[in-house]
Image: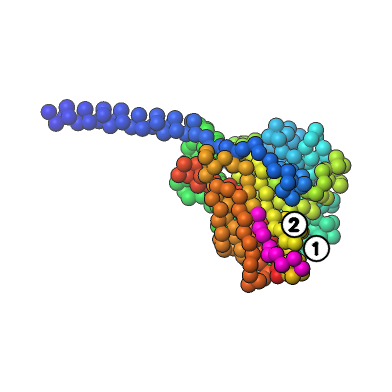
Amino acid sequence: MNFAILIVSTRLFLVFAVVLLLLIYLRIKFFKLKIDFTSGKNENRPCSKLFELNGIIHFHTVYSDGSGCIEDLIETAKKLKADFLVSSDHNTLKPKLDGLEGYYGGLLYFAGEEINTEFGHLLALGIESEIKRGKYKEVLSNVKRQNGAAVICHPHNWWTPWKNFKVKGYDGIEIINLDSQWRGMNPLYMLAVICSYRINPFYALHFLSHKPAKTIKFWDGVQKHKSMKTGIAATDAHSNVKITRRRRIKFPKYSELFSVARTHILLEDKLSGKLEEDKKKITEAVKKGRCFFAFDLFGMPKGFYYYASVGGKYYFSGDSADAAADIDKTGKNVIIYAGIDINPKKNPYIINLFRNGKNIFSSKSGGLVYEIKSALDSPSFYRVEIDVYFGRKEITYLYSNNIEVYI
């Protein structure tokens, strides 16, 4: 009798386990999170006069430790509707020297370089001559001589972290670095990524969208008067995971990582179609901080705006607003505006305004308007983050760069 009960119980358990595994499989297979954007545009916003470009920055190819050819990755980026593409192979500018830079249809490709220093890796954008690995000060000086942008790579990656957070002179920081996002995961999430990738890459890669709190704290802490540090999103794609001494697999695919996070550049003029001129425009935008970055995996951001207004003057990300004279002249305070064209009925969202790293104001499912009434803590650095909700799931979807206001 007891043996019969054991058999029945075992069968019921197996049926339950199979049903549970099937439900988990179906959940993963058909999992999809997409932001519902509205189509409305407001041409009266000051930022509507700026030209937005979305770009894929920092990835590796067969010129260093990646598995992809430049030509193939350009075609991949074109299919994904990127406007510009910047590679960053280790300690080499050979893609440029081989004449691969240029326009490919509507896509601009140029080569950057990820350079080894004693403190970690430094990303150089917009340079013309190859820079050899070396001391940080020497590498930085070389980047500056070439009018390039120097960006600290993956500062809190446990594998290759940045080792000196007191250095000066660099232009920006990789806030989102997908390699760091992966390595910094909870082990259970990491296991979920590995197990689910073959079933649904979107499900696996959506775990990369967690907020890099330590890097953001570092970013907020190094903003200085008229010397702000730009934040960008970097794919750091290699698609070349080592399994054994001789065997490697192309995981994750470039096409998938290129879709996860991008840097969006804001320009005052359209690109000219000339390589050197447009490369300089993009590099200068990064140096100035005239950009924002988002997890485009959930949808390309539409209608995002962020600016400060005082006395008829407008200031955008990367700007330093000396507002005292305008306030005295007009009697008006500085007003900060931010918004995005997300349908709040489908995806409730919150726009959070940060001053010197502290959340000081929020707007739920609508445009943010904030009046700066006090000169305390001047100069102050203001930026916004947008949190989007998919049911109970919350994702910090978009990050702006800073506007400095001093009164």
Mark yes or no: residue 375 visible: yes
Closer to the chain start, of discs 1 and 2, is 1
- The structure residue drawn at horizontal position 47% and vertical position 41%, both measured from the top left corner, is 391
Which quarter of the picture shows residue 105? top right
Instruction: Indicate the position of residue 333 as horizontal and vertical percent values.
Output: 68, 65
Front residue (pair 122, 287): 287
Please, what secondary structure does the residue beneath circle 1 have?
helix
Please, what secondary structure does the residue beneath circle 2 have?
strand
In the rendered structure, the answer to whether residue 65 lies left or right of residue 112 reads left
Q: Cα distance, mark 1 to mark 2?
A: 33 Å
Q: Which residues are magenta?
A: 329-337
Residue 141: which disc? Answer: 1
- The structure residue drawn at horizontal position 65% and vertical position 54%, both measured from the top left corner, is 337
**Which circle, 1 or 2, is nearer the viewer?**
2
User: Which quadrant would the N terminus be assigned to in this image?
Assistant: top left
Residue 314: which disc? Answer: 2
- The structure residue drawn at horizontal position 79% and vertical position 44%, both measured from the top left corner, is 110
Front residue (pair 53, 175): 53
Neighbour class for label 2 at 10 Å: few (<14), some, many (≥20)? some
Mark yes or no: residue 124 visible: no
Q: Is residue 203 above or below residue 380?
A: above
In the rendered structure, the answer to whether residue 314 lies left or right of residue 220 reads right
Neighbour class for label 1 at 10 Å: few (<14), some, many (≥20)? some
Residue 361: which disc? Answer: none
**Amino acid bearing label 1:** Ser
Q: Is residue 397 above or below residue 5?
A: below
Residue closest to the far front: 331
